[in-house]
Image (spheres, grey):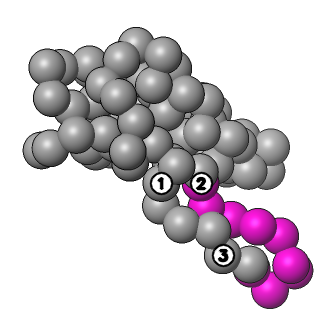
Amino acid sequence: WADVLDVDGDVLGSRLWLLEQSEVTETTARRARFYAREALQWMLTGRHVRAIDFETVVGDEAIELTVLVTQKDGTTVALGPFVIVGVG
């Protein structure tokens, strides 16, 4: 999860790294979903996938984020869970 420039000068990546020192709260989980959607929006805009959804689990010591990608053929692939905040 980092920012890079592609060959066209577009910024790719996410701002999820900004959450590393955040508290484990539902507010932080909402922000994680927002940052993840922001980072993957190009997949929707370019019509590379049908849909992208996000699930977060707020535990006692960590927030986990799972990305659910619905492909063009309708199948859904789950990526993660990724530990966004806390220990995992």
Q: In this view, does 60 lie to the left or right of 35?
A: left
- Residue 85, by quadrant, is top left
Nearer to us: label 2 or label 1: 1
Q: In this view, does 29 lie above or below 82?
A: above
Judge from the rendering whether residue 24 lies leftward or rightward of residue 15; answer left or right. left
Neighbor class of circle 1 (other Cα within 10 Å; few <14, some 14-19, many 20+) is: some
Secondary structure mostly seen in magenta is loop
**Callout 2: few (<14), some (14-19), or many (20+) C-alpha neighbours within 10 Å?**
some
Q: Earlier in the sequence, mark 1 or mark 3?
A: 3
Residue 55 numbered tag: none
Q: Name the residue under label 1.
A: 17
x 68%, y 41%: residue = 38
> Contact, CB < 8 Å: mark 2 with mark 1?
yes
Foreground residue among 52 and 26: 26
Residue 76: x and y in percent read 40, 32
Q: What stretch is highlighted in magenta?
A: 6-14
Q: Residue placed farthest to the bottom in the image?
A: 7
Q: Residues within 10 Å of mark 3 (few under 14, many from 20)?
A: few
Q: Residue furthest right?
A: 8
Check residue 14 in the rendering and tell me which mark sits there, or answer none.
2
**Magenta region includes residue 7:** yes
Amino acid of disc 3: Val
Residue at 26% x, 20% y: name it: 57
Whole-percent x, y for residue 35 in the image: 60, 39
Q: How far apart are marks 2 and 1 (CA)?
A: 7 Å
Residue named by callout 3: 4
In the rendered structure, does residue 45 fall within the stretch colored magenta?
Answer: no
Residue at 80% across / 86% down in the picture? Answer: 7
User: SS of the residue at dot 3?
Assistant: strand
Q: Earlier in the sequence, mark 2 or mark 3?
A: 3
Spatial distance from mark 1 to mark 3, Cα to Cα?
A: 13 Å
